[in-house]
């Protein structure tokens, strides 16, 4: 799968929401789903456990219509956050055009964030992709929680953002920062249209 | 781009948010070079362009001789690209470096334009070194412009960096009042106050607010009330003033409503617009590249169908790959054309070498030329037996030609067609050639005039390729040489032809020649060649007789879709003509003299066209003296009727004059 297909005049962007368990990846997708006009979105596929944890992955196709003669589609995926679903994460990550790393702002989740970020790098590397070339943004979710429970965006930035990626504070439940994140990753991904689709996974 | 006279310092409303920017701009306008470069940044609609152009006006007012240039980055980039495409990038640089005050708008679009960034860096260094002022605007500070070269960032930020904030309440009020006055409208202080409180992001929206209020006030009789204004600005339906109080109630709530409520439409559409812009920018970028390539290659005479298909959306594959493939093909075509030129001058200009879509053919052609097997000139497809008019004067020649075509090399070899100019020798020669080709597709039939034959040989000798030239003709299956008498006096060509002649005869290959005179009467032709020509069948072609001319005229008129009176064909055929060409000339003269769309060609018109006024008179006479078909047979008796009335003719001539 290529980002842009000149034969069929299609642009397909696969964006994967990555992050530790319960950081709010599915919530991001649910919020987006709620805001997209019905004719633009496909059915959101969610494979969840009984306790509403993502078991396999969530998938939300967005049809943005024809842009400059190209049928443009976005496919948003989430990965299951729990450590033991790594095989699934690798599968979902295949062919991703961009990654949104959703971090849990709670202070006690810092270890999980770091672990998940390392896992992401590991998985990208295993697919033979240069991490530096894959478009990525960070989202610090749950910034609406009481101050004494969470780390500030600055603190999280210091802890997680060693690559100097764009970061967004968010409250995915209410939608704050969700579309800002999506816009940023889309712009990053589409910027690669001009650079040619080299160095992509899959 | 010219400065817009509306944008002056006088019309710029200064507030807390833009005071520093306005002061800096004024200083730069009055004393260029004070802050160099001056970099103004602000969100859209806060007056960057206004301030930038105001600097230009003020500077010109102070020093009318100053060379001021205002340009948006997009235009700047376009000019630069055009200059590069025209190979005049140095002239472009010189022109820009001559500017005393360069005002560059919207430089945020420098993002991702590496080559333009490098160019701008070079230019701004040169301008600043020469003490020329540069002022730039952007919607964000240099450090936040994506992918901007570090050196450029430091250079841009090295002068004065000023941001412009949104207008505060007082400034908004002042702007509203000024705009309302400019538009010649009267709005009450309360209405202006309400409008100033409306949640707008920038000055442009504020001006939109004034326009809406003024438009609404103009449409209603009474002056607008503050409540009605609020309702209007909150997006409520326009309400007549008397009941304005009731619907005005929800208006104040509108800005206070929870942000989640306001989000939905905004969120998705702003996402969509980000995506659309990114995609469009990319698509436009490669469209631009392809468009430039089309112009460039067309300018160099190459066919660009393949690239045009890309632009029309029919092409497949990555445009960059297609572009690269195209350029590779063009390069190969060029080298092929060069190779061909060294082998065969005439072939180098062939259309084959300008069409990358026919690269395969060009390759094959050059390969054949290399081996010396490039086919010699072939017969013209238009001249066939079907189109040839046979008759009593060329009957023998046509029969001989048909026999040769049916049984080449055996029936009559060589066949020599002799006749004066215009009797159809060339036509018959090519007809034989075409018939030979039709009978044996793939056969090589050399069919050309003796003059061309001679010129080719000269070119081959000049290019030291005589061997190649000989091989080319020796490989042919038949040689049809038109106007062989033109070889008179050309000894070397005659010698080559003599050798070729013998080879062809030995191999049983057909030879056909056309001559204006009998072989024995030729002068300047070697006797050994003359005797060989005489050895074959020599048949004559004469000028067309009346039935042949009639047939020719009929065909020519039919081909031109001309309606004629019955007598016209007979008249034209009866005119003296010594050959097919002369007949065609007559017909063309007559047809050319009429308007073919609605006129029927009459004998009179034909006569006038060919004979002038004399024709007119004789036509009238002919009409007057013609016996109508339905005349009583009795009256046809010559003895009883006076058919020609000399006085009538005289009188008619008088009338016509």
Image (cartoon, grey):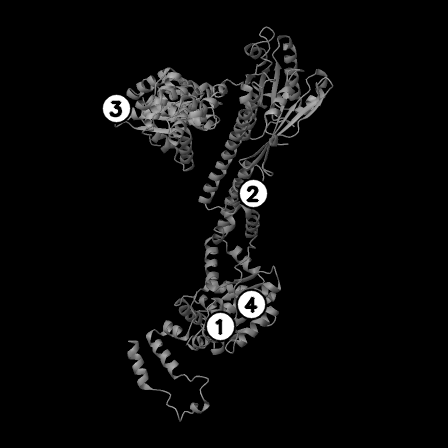
The residue where tag 3 is placed is: B62
Between discs 4 and 1, the one toward the N terminus? 4
Q: Residues within 10 Å of mark 1 (few under 14, many from 20)?
A: some
Residue found at the far top of this picture = A148
User: In this orientation, which residue lies closer to the viewer: A186 or B632?
Assistant: B632
Q: SS class of the residue under badge 4?
A: helix
Distance of label 4 from label 2 (alpha carbons):
44 Å
Q: Are marks 3 and 2 on the same chain?
A: yes
Q: SS class of the residue under badge 1?
A: helix
Quarter placement of the C terminus of chain B: bottom left
The residue where tag 1 is placed is: B554
Identify the chain of the residue marked 3, using the numbered disc in the image: B
Q: Quadrant of residue B152?
A: top left
Q: Which mark is residue B432?
A: 4
Would you say A109 lies left or right of B227 here?
right
Q: Quadrant of residue B655?
A: bottom left
Q: Residue at x 60, y 63 (%)?
A: B438
Q: SS class of the residue under badge 2?
A: loop
Q: Residues within 10 Å of mark 2 (few under 14, many from 20)?
A: some
Distance of label 3 from label 4 (alpha carbons):
87 Å
Between discs 2 and 1, the one toward the N terminus? 2
Q: SS class of the residue under badge 3?
A: helix
């Amino acid at each position: 799968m290529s980002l842009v297909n000149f034969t069929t005049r299609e642009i397909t962007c696969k964006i994967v929401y990555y992050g530790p368990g319960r950081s709010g990846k599915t919530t991001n997708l649910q919020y987006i789903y709620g805001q997209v006009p019905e004719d633009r979105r496909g059915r959101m596929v969610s494979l969840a456990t009984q306790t509403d944890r993502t078991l396999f992955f969530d998938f939300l196709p967005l049809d943005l219509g024809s842009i400059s003669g190209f049928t443009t589609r976005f496919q948003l995926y989430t990965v299951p956050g729990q450590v033991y679903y790594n095989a699934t994460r690798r599968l979902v990550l295949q062919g991703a055009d961009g990654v949104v790393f959703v971090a849990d702002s709670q202070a006690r989740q810092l270890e999980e964030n770091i672990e998940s970020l390392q896992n992401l790098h590991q998985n990208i590397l295993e697919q033979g992709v240069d991490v530096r070339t894959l478009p990525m943004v960070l989202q610090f979710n749950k910034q609406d929680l009481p101050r004494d429970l969470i780390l500030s965006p600055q603190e999280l930035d210091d802890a997680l953002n060693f690559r100097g990626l764009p970061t967004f504070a968010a409250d995915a439940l209410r939608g704050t920062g969700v579309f800002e994140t999506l816009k940023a990753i889309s712009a990053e991904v589409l910027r690669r249209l001009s650079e040619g689709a080299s160095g992509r996974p899959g | 781009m010219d400065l817009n006279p509306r944008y002056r310092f006088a019309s710029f409303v200064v507030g807390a948010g833009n005071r520093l920017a306005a002061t800096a701009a004024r200083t730069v306008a009055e004393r260029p070079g004070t802050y160099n470069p001056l970099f103004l940044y602000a969100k859209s609609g806060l007056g960057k362009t206004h301030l930038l152009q105001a600097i230009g006006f003020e500077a010109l007012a102070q020093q009318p001789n100053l060379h001021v240039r205002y340009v948006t980055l997009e235009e700047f980039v376009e000019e630069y690209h055009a200059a590069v495409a025209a190979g005049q990038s140095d002239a472009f640089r010189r022109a820009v470096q001559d500017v005393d005050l360069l005002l560059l708008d919207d430089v945020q679009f420098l993002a991702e334009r590496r080559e333009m960034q490098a160019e701008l860096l070079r230019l701004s260094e040169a301008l600043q070194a020469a003490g020329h002022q540069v002022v730039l605007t952007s919607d964000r500070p240099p450090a936040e412009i994506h992918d901007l070269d570090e050196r450029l960032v430091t250079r841009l930020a090295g002068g004065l960096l000023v941001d412009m904030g949104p207008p505060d309440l007082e400034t908004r009020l002042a702007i509203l009042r000024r705009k309302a006055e400019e538009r010649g409208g009267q709005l009450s202080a309360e209405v202006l106050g309400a409008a100033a409180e409306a949640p707008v992001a920038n000055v442009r929206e504020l001006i939109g607010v004034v326009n809406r209020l003024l438009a609404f006030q103009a449409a209603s009789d009474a002056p607008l009330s503050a409540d009605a204004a609020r309702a209007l600005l909150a997006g409520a339906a326009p309400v007549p003033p008397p009941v304005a109080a009731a619907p005005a109630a929800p208006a104040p709530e509108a800005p206070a409503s929870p942000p989640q409520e306001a989000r939905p439409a905004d969120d998705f559409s702003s996402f969509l617009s980000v995506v659309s812009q990114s995609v469009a920018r990319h698509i436009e970028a490669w469209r631009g590249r392809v468009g430039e390539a089309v112009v460039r290659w067309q300018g160099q005479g190459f066919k660009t169908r393949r690239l045009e298909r890309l632009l029309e959306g029919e092409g497949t594959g990555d445009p960059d790959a297609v572009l690269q493939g195209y350029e590779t093909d063009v390069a190969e075509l060029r080298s092929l054309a060069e190779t061909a030129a060294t082998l065969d001058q005439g072939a180098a200009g062939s259309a084959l070498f300008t069409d990358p879509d026919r690269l395969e053919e060009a390759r094959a052609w050059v390969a054949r030329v290399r081996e010396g097997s490039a086919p010699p000139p072939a017969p013209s497809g238009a001249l066939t037996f079907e189109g040839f008019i046979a008759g009593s004067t060329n009957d023998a020649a046509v029969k001989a030609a048909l026999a040769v075509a049916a049984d080449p090399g055996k029936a009559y070899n060589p066949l020599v067609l002799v006749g004066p100019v215009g009797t159809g020798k060339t036509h018959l020669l090519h007809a034989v050639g075409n018939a030979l080709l039709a009978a044996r597709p793939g056969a090589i039939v050399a069919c050309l005039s003796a003059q061309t034959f001679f010129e080719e040989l000269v070119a081959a000798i000049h290019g030291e390729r005589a061997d190649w030239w000989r091989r080319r003709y020796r490989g042919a299956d038949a040689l049809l040489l038109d106007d062989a008498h033109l070889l008179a006096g050309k000894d070397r060509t005659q010698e080559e032809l003599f050798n070729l002649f013998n080879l062809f005869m030995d191999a049983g290959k057909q030879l056909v020649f056309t001559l204006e005179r009998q072989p024995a009467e030729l002068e300047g032709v070697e006797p050994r060649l003359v005797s060989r020509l005489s050895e074959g069948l020599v048949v004559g072609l004469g000028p067309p007789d009346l039935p042949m001319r009639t047939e020719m005229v009929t065909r020519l008129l039919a081909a031109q879709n001309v309606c004629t009176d019955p007598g016209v064909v007979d008249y034209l055929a009866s005119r003296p003509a010594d050959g097919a060409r002369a007949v065609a000339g007559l017909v063309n003269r007559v047809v050319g003299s009429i308007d073919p769309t609605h006129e029927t060609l009459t004998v009179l018109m034909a006569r006038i066209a060919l004979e002038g006024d004399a024709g007119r008179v004789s036509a009238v006479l002919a009409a007057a003296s013609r016996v109508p078909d339905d005349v009583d047979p009795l009256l046809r008796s010559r003895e009883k009727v006076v058919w020609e009335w000399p006085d009538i003719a005289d009188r008619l001539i008088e009338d016509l004059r």
